[in-house]
Image: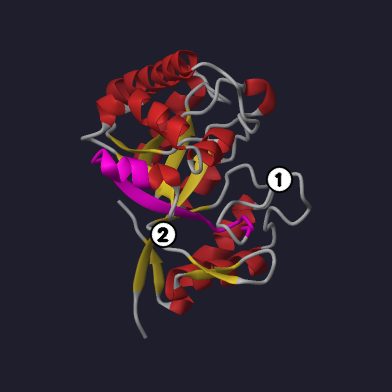
Amino acid sequence: MKAYTIDINCDVGEGIGNEAELLPMISSCNIACGGHAGDVNTMTKVVRLAKENQVKVGAHPSYPDPENFGRISMDISSDVLITSIQNQMESFTSILKKEKVKMHHIKPHGALYNDIAKDASLAKIFLKSILNFKDIIFLYVPFNSVIENEALKQNFKIKNEAFGDRNYNEDLSLVSRKLPNAVLEKPEEVLPHLLSMVKEEQLKASDGSIIKVKADTYCIHGDTPSALQILTYLSKELPKHNIAIARG
């Protein structure tokens, strides 16, 4: 049986306070840096926990919209968005420097992540905002997306991401969180979803169709209510399928 080693990431530092439980079971994390959630204290705390657990550290910038947790598209100017993202990155990198931790990746959050996956103009604006990090980080992006194509054109290093706890539409977009079937909350549902993506490079969309997907990293959202139960279950079950979680 073929053996696999995968990266599992979590969005953290978003006010849930479960990082001490989650980080020992994952291999990379995306830390909110003030756009939708997070401040100096939460960033520092999670960076230290990541360091202790040998978890790769990433920035999780978003639209500047804490009121809506960064989950609603914003009609703002490119200058305002660039300034906001750069300010978020500056806050985050200053903490990394203080804690002597290397940044591994950047993963945009929420509506910004979804918008740049399909809007070329916005994707270019986002890439402009993180241009200073181009040679030192990976960018986590959805498979076969606009941001993936644009990032590769500009010679960014990317890692394709897929979501272990989210349902997909047939066009590889995520099912809206407004719908009841958007999030997979039962560990027993997440496992086959993840196995299909890892071993077969495909998934079953919400309409029942089978679609191709390739991923280098798989996300379990830290704010999914059952995140801890999901990760505990995966830690126990994945080795039975010859799948290890990458560490260090």
Label 1 residue SS: loop
Say which of 148 and 136 sits in front: 148
| Residue at the image point whose x is 55% and y is 41% from the top | 114
Q: Is residue 191 above or below residue 126?
A: below
Label 2 residue SS: loop
| Residue at the image point whose x is 57% and y is 57% from the top | 171
Magenta highlight on residue 166 = yes
Q: Is residue 239 above or below residue 213?
A: below
What mark, if any, has residue 215 been given in the picture?
A: 2
- Image location of residue 247, percent across then percent down: 33, 55
Left or right: where 149 falls relative to 68 = left
Q: Amino acid at mark 1?
A: Arg
Q: Is residue 74 above or below residue 79?
A: below
Q: Which residues are magenta?
A: 149-169
Q: Which residue is mark 1?
A: 177
What mark, if any, has residue 110 been given in the picture?
A: none
Q: CA distance from mark 2 to mark 1?
A: 22 Å
**N-terminal of the two: label 2 or label 1?**
1
- Specify whether residue 100 is in view: no
Residue 153, quarter of picture: top left
